[in-house]
Image: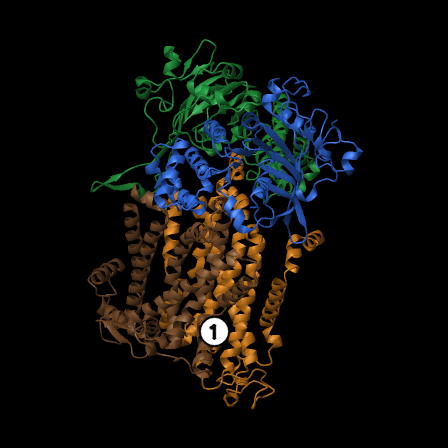
Chain colours: A green, B orange, C blue, D brown
Amino acid sequence: MTNQNTALLSLRNVVKHFDISGGLLDQLRLSGGRITRKRTVVHAVNDVSFDILPGETLSVVGESGCGKSTLARTVIGLYRATGGEILYRGERIDNLSDAGMLPYRTRMQMVFQDPYASLNPRMKVREILEEPVRFHNPGISDADVRARVAAVMEQVGVNPLWGVRYPHEFSGGQRQRISIARALVVDPEFIVADEPISALDVSIQAQVLNLMMDMQEQRNLTYLFISHDLSVVEHISTRVAVMYLGSLCELASAADLFGAPRHPYTQALLSAIPRIGGKAAAHIKLSGDVPTPINLPSGCVFHGRCPHANERCMREVPKARQLANGSLVACHGVEEGRV
Amino acid sequence: MAGLLRRFRQSYFLYSFLRDPVAVTSFALFVILASSALLAPVFAPHNPYDGANIDIMDAETPPLWKDGGNPAFLLGTDNQGRDLFSAILYGMRVSLLIGVGAVAMQACIGIMVGLLSGYGSRRLDNILMRIADVQLSFSSYMVAIFLGAIVQMTFGVGRYEQVAVPFLVLVIGLAEWPQYARTVRASVLAEKKKEYVEAARVIGLKPFRIMWRHILPNTLTPVLVISTVQVANAIMSEAALSFLGLGMPVTKPSLGSLIKSGFQYFFSGSWWITLFPGVVLILLVLSINLLGDWLRDFLNPKLYKD
Amino acid sequence: MQPLLDVSSLTVKFALRDTALTAVNDVSFTLSKGERLGLVGESGAGKSVTGFSILNLVSKPGFIAGGSVLFEGRDLTRADAETLRDIRGNRISMIFQDPMMTLNPVLTVGTQMIETIRAHKKVTRKEAEAIALDKLRKVYIPSPERRLTQYPHEFSGGMRQRIVIAIALLTSPSLIIADEPTTALDVTIQAEIMDLLLELCQSEDMGLILITHDLGVVSQVTQKIAVMYAMGDTASVVGAPLHPYTRGLLGALPQCADKADCGLETVAAPRARRRLNQIPGSMPSLSDVPRGCPFNNRCELCETVCTTTRPLLEKKSDGRLAACHMVA
Amino acid sequence: MFAFIVRRVAQALLVMFIITREMVGVSVSVKEREALREKLGLNDPYLVQWARFTKNALQGDLGTSYFYRKPALDVILSKAPATLELVFVAQCIIVLISVPVGVYSACRPRSVLSRLFMGISIVGVSVPVFLTAIFMIYIFSVHLGWLPSFGRGNPVEIFPGWTSVLTTWSNFKHIILPSIALSSIMLPLFIRLIRAEMKEALETEYVKFARAKGLPEWRVVMVHAFKNTLLPVITVGGVQLGIMIAFTILTETVFQWQGMGFMFVEAVERADTALLVAYLIFVGAIFVAVNTVVDLIYGFVNPMVRIAGRK
């Protein structure tokens, strides 16, 4: 693991559970003539640790329900972690009050998935972009606010004159640019992007990806990039983390991960990407479906579908171990040299 | 201001309104009814509240065009000799006043409760929604009738007259607020999940500001839609209460109490005392309902397709 | 020999209050028995509408405004309701995008399968049930007898899509139209479903029209690819695309920018940070499709003729079809 | 299922608590109040009063009617059959008309007939029940003389304590006008509800899929679309049934129908508080019961609830 002092953001054993059992009444069950109380807990993120280095793009990939979006929202402070620590440049931020979190709000920002839901339909684009500037710089003059917003709009490729329009007057790609602009107006150094392009068409995806890469270059941004699209991740990332059912399976540099995946789940996932001109038959077939995060399997969460699983995998939760090339892999099989 | 006016004139709202003859007609009808009610003292030939003006000898005069009609009384008189036309104008004013007032009250309580319940803690939500459930499980009529009975009993008929209007506003307002609370809560819950709210939280805005500035404006469309229907319902509720003798007293009649006062004479030949206020009541409610219908279709594009 | 399906100059419009918007304009393609065709395009390109109009199932206010769909020699755009009903679900089956929405939540899987068989074949319930069980086994549903009595929400997403495929297979159709069959599913499940679909098409000698936005999926499963853009048909093949839109689309894919194995020689050499090739602007909405070639306002090859005359789909020098003035 | 029953009971108790609490303190008039207060124990703390009232209520004692000089519950039980019968017939009218009309106008939204239905329905919503009743009496009783204008005729006792007008035609004639008047306010709502839900169901993917499967049109409409429409209709239906009982007050007043509603208005005029309280508690109980039944039916139609209940 990288040195804590150099990391921009560190996650230490982060756990996030959601209690969805509802009120006390819903928890009560009549079983065998006795009333029992049963909680229903979604284990969205389980014991995830990694560092994000300044200037890199760390992507988190996984199938739907694997907890990658929850992880993103826990990092940015939308959810409060159930356990573990989140450190920003060495300072703990996961237990701060709203007021204590305020200084970090200008340093960390977020870009959302749905370009239609992420902009308030009742506010003009200019109002949407000016609000964070005014909020974080009380007493700033109107002219300064306008100038700052106009500069950012220019940068992301939205004509500042269009600020008087409402979001519904823009196309999906343009909205996503506005959404990026809203994150950038407070001049952050770290951006969490939760599936920022998955709701867009292919030709628009390329535009937005290019914009994100340009912004990273110009502003020296660090990205935590959440996506389920592996080919996009391969293209944009410095390092990639693979999640399955709330647990981290593998974290490696993009080249290592896509060149020589080590974790059986990563291997299966990569083989499933439809490659243009590739052959379809080469898929590694996984048996069964993804279990629900409500009743987690014992031991390794992947053992039910893993072709290499043995008795130890059912019993013992694998720890993430560092390999020679710096990758982290959480698998007994890799550790024992079986896989 | 001029710019706003111009934008309104070019808006799709106005365009589709003008293209719908039913909407235009009902709007015109509503404007005529409402303005003649508001300006009742100007239009009405007599003042029905002024006892000195009323002569019991004029009672049950038929409308002008019937045998025995009196040119002074266009639509005839009621059983006390009041000019029916004037009484209807004044009565409509009372009905509208109570309807709008009650809805304003429902909306105030309902929006507050809905916002708190949708955006507040789950426990608060549970408490507020249970109260709303209980309130809803008694239909508003029942609550209103019961409270009406109690208040009339405690105040006595004489003093009841003075408090009738605020009381009816209060009772109809209290009876129907859960409609608003549920509508607002449902759309707050839907809006709360949207990413623009999360974006506002990532900016660091305070919950109150998010609730007020970001969520509330996005819940107003359904509020607008149910408001029209609620005004119509409130007017009908008032009429029903008055018809049961628990609403406006006959000395200060609303449309409902006019209908009631005529009911017992209806089958003995004096049909006009009930018929004319009844028709006006129906036209008033119908025009509001038609407008509400159009508004709902306009604001809900899913239904707008057909 | 006549093709299984011959779509020629198909035009679909949507009636609005004052005007009619063209959603599909003059689309033509053919499919022979057992052949697999990919229909590719971005959202709004009219690919789903094309799929539905083959079965004459365009939902209101849409309507087929011209052209013909010849299936086994019969024109489905002019067929009467009874003929259509006989072909739908019997000779041509459809698979929809979201298996969550496709199956009726209040009917058991068994009911939904048996009603399909009995709508087309005179069989008893028992016999219909036997067919249903057989098809469920074909799509690898474990313990199918028990599954027949369950409701859709008791299945996972991948299982549901298998059931939809099993329903499509019930009457052994000669053509399956699959409208984005894996878009709502996860990558690993998606791969399984595509494999299954391909396997079944090959073993039963069924034709397939695969409607998707994913060029990767299409290139693995189908033999022919038609690319649609803003209501038009700009057919070409991925190997070495002719039409500037198809080239742009491929260049926009990260996997093509990263690797040179897409057969795309002309993709701009990757810049420092591997910028993707981007098509400027976005797809026009149906109400303001430009005159001439619908792609002209985003095309780098655009010339005067492109803004005046709509290019027709024609054979180019290497025998492939493309609708473009600028490609020889 | 367990949580459901507990919640229902708790809710019912809460409803009852609020009703009884609100009412226990209510007195008849200012003059009589003081004398009565002591006698009825109204000077005790509210909770004590409430506890006493509840204890009595649980033993079936809802107090004594001043006017009838009988236990209030007995008075209500003797009036209840008339009201329930009226509601039942009105409900039948609503179901029999709203389902076909709603389904038809959802399937053919642009046809002249559908537009006519919709037009009539919005007029129907806008006419108050008592006006419908008055106009109908005028037309069918006074003018045409076809149907009786008031009363219940000579109801026949079909069970001990349950008299009915449904058994003979001459009695049945009495219920025609009141039940139509009562259904007139709910019918348009149901037509519109069924139409809206049906239209939504007809646009779902599974209906499209059913068509693509080549099913006959009647099966697509009546099995695939209509079965899904039932769920919201049942939910709303339960709530509306409660409101309908409230509307019987108006209907029964106009038609002098000797049911609970008529009795209620009389009790208001006679300041018979015990009877008023008993009435509200009785109606509240009916309401809770109806809602429980509706929830059970809902669970029966909706497979997802059934599963959730089984857990």
In this orientation, which residue lies closer to the viewer: C234 or A250? C234
In this orientation, which residue lies closer to the viewer: A115 or C81? C81
Residue C34 appears at what percent x and percent y? 54, 31
In this orientation, which residue lies closer to the viewer: A48 or D5? D5
Seen in the image, is D234 located left or right of residue C303?
left
Residue marked by disc 1: B256
**Could you say which quadrant of the image residue A276 lies in?**
top right
Residue C286 appears at what percent x and percent y? 66, 43
Q: How many marks?
A: 1
Above or below residue C8? Residue D84 is below
**Could you say which quadrant of the image residue C72 lies in?**
top right
Q: Is residue D43 visible?
A: yes
The chain that hosts pointer 1 is B
Q: Residues within 10 Å of mark 1 (few under 14, many from 20)?
A: many
Seen in the image, is C305 located left or right of residue C123?
right
Residue closest to the far right:
C304
Above or below residue B145? Residue C148 is above
Q: Is residue B163 visible?
A: no
Seen in the image, is D43 located left or right of residue D187?
left
Above or below residue C15? Residue D157 is below
**Quadrant into which the C terminus of chain B falls:** bottom right
In this orientation, which residue lies closer to the viewer: C39 or D126? C39
SS label for mark 1: helix
Q: Given the image, on which type of amino acid does mark 1 rest?
A: Gly
Above or below residue A195? Residue B140 is below
Residue C116 appears at what percent x and percent y? 44, 44
Residue A289 appears at what percent x and percent y? 39, 29
Residue closest to the far top:
A324
